[in-house]
Amino acid sequence: MLKYILIFICFPVLMQAQNVQNIGQLLDSLKANPQTKSDVIAVQKAVNARNSVYSKLFPDISGFGRYDYGSSPTGMLPVAPDEMFAMKADPSVGQPFSKNIFRVGAVISMPVYIQSLYTTARMAKMMVRSAKDKAYINLLSNEALLVGLNSNLIYIKSLEKALDSKRASLLKTKQFVEIKVNNGRASVNALLKINNALNDISVTMNNLEIQKQQIIAVINSYTGVRLSKPVEMTQAGTFQKGEFKALNPLLDKLKATHLAYRAEKEKLLPSLVAVGSFSDNFARAYNNNLNINNHYTAAAIVLKIPIFSKDQYSQIKKSHLEMEDTQNEVAKLKLNLTSQSLQLQKSLDLLDNSLLLYKKSVKDKQQLLEIATVDYKTGRMTMEDYLKYVDDLVFEKARLYKAHSEKWQTLMKLAVIYGNNIEQIVK
């Protein structure tokens, strides 16, 4: 037991210490986190509620002990007339009547036919299905979130790399400018502009670090893993169109509310219940004070016919309103998913085109910067124009990296909508 306690206490530390190499390992850590366990518990609650309904179909047996007192002698059990006449003819026989009677025994009841109970059982089964579907969609949503967050970390890392490249380029230029300033061939203003550009890079890098730490904290809250850098991931597939599986939890809930409404109406139907009892009775006979011990068994089939139940009519109305409310939720979510899926698919196509354009643009701006560097060093370009080429290249790279991140996030949203297996899309 101590070993399990230590593992539980050390689990977060172990997760932080482990070396997560790829997105698959990161997604695996999500499944052991409280964020996911809460959905597992929700499913278990639904299963328990279903089992609770099923248990009402089984016999209900209970024992009892009882003491009865009457101001006049009371019968311990029903006695046939011929037996009673025989007892009266023989005073030595104790008659089964007494003021003080002790009883022990058992009672049993069991539904024979209660239509609403069977419908409620089907409703509970549908709620279990809804809970399982919801747990699956929540897991997909969390996995999609992790992929999106990791893509943002990749974006930040790539942008930092571009800024480092810009800094290295400016430092080389600074050395060249310092020589020109020392030789009197350039003003100090040129050096100040270089230093200002370098300072801007440091400010941007600091802001990126803040964003990175915020993303790392969110990932840690979902997985228990604290990353120091983005994990590797590649696209192994794409989303598969089909039915909106993100709608399934609500559709199951709608079926369940329909069955609940039906069950409430069926409570107005007749029902059959089997009941039985056994008692062992002890007393002193009222006629001769002798100890008497007898037992009695009874069984019956009870037909219950509701005639008027104001409360039940209110329950029927309530369940009908809940069904209509769920129908409206399904309609709203379906409309939203339809609109969102069309927009995301269009965005995905546009992002693919943007990536091609950005890659070509980065290549062109890299060549332009190389030309601008030569022109500046030969005095054919001002410092302002040269810095503009430097900024243009970094800006274009930032747009390229951002497009990559947006494509990942768009792809993940579509995977959640259609209920695709994310672990087959990203590796």
Image (spheres, helix red, strand yellow):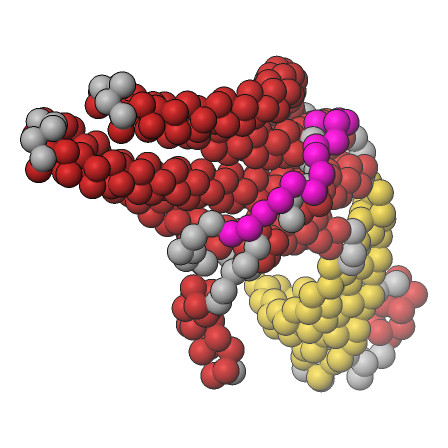
Q: Is residue 125 visible?
A: yes
Q: Position of residue 336 (x, y in %)?
A: 59, 18
Q: Is residue 315 visible?
A: no
User: What residue span does the magenta drawing correspond to?
Assistant: 231-244
* Camera-side residue of 241 and 63: 241
Reply yes or no: does residue 240 show up in magenta: yes
Query: Going by the image, does 378 lie left or right of 189?
Result: right
The residue at the point 68 percent across, 77 percent down is 283
Q: Quadrant of residue 165?
A: top left
* Camera-side residue of 390 and 175: 175
Reply yes or no: does residue 155 show up in magenta: no
Query: Going by the image, does 314 lie left or right of 281?
Result: left
Q: Position of residue 201 (x, y in %)?
A: 25, 36
Say how many tags the image has.
0
The residue at the point 84 percent across, 43 percent down is 113
* Camera-side residue of 36 and 64: 36
Q: Quadrant of residue 262?
A: top right
Q: Position of residue 52 (x, y in %)?
A: 68, 52
Q: Quadrant of residue 344?
A: top right
